[in-house]
Amino acid sequence: MQTVFETFLEQLSESVDETDFREAMA
């Protein structure tokens, strides 16, 4: 499950700006 979650974060960071990603996680 750890690997799947890390892969999801990698794909998300590639398609989403870092600022928007931080705002979504905040």
Image: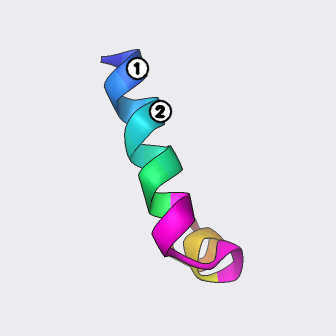
The amino acid type found where label 1 is placed reads: Thr
Q: Which mark is residue 6?
A: 2
Q: Position of residue 13 (x, y in %)?
A: 55, 61
User: Is residue 25 rendered to the left or right of residue 8?
Assistant: right
Q: Quadrant of residue 19?
A: bottom right
Q: Nearer the viewer, residue 14 or 23?
A: 14
- Give left or right: position of 11 versus 19: left
Residue ID for mark 1: 3
Whether the residues at callouts 1 and 2 have beta carbons within 8 Å, the answer is: yes
In the rendered view, would you say 12 is above or below 19?
above
Assign a secondary structure to mark 1. helix
Q: Which of these two is toward me, 22 or 11?
A: 11
Q: Which corner quadrant holds the C terminus?
A: bottom right
Q: Is residue 7 magenta?
A: no
Would residue 9 appear left or right of 4 to someone viewing this image? right
Q: Is residue 4 left or right of residue 12?
A: left
Q: Main secondary structure of the magenta part?
A: helix
Q: How is the image coloured?
A: rainbow
Picture residue at 38% right of the left edge, 33% below the top: 5
- Would you place residue 24 above or below residue 10 in this image? below
Give the magenta-colored segment's residue range: 13-19
Amino acid on which the number 2 mark rests in the picture: Glu
Q: Secondary structure at mark 2?
A: helix
Residue 15 location in percent, x, y? 47, 72
Q: Position of residue 17 (x, y in %)?
A: 62, 79
Neighbour tally class for label 1: few under 14, some 14-19, many 20 plus, Cα within 10 Å: few
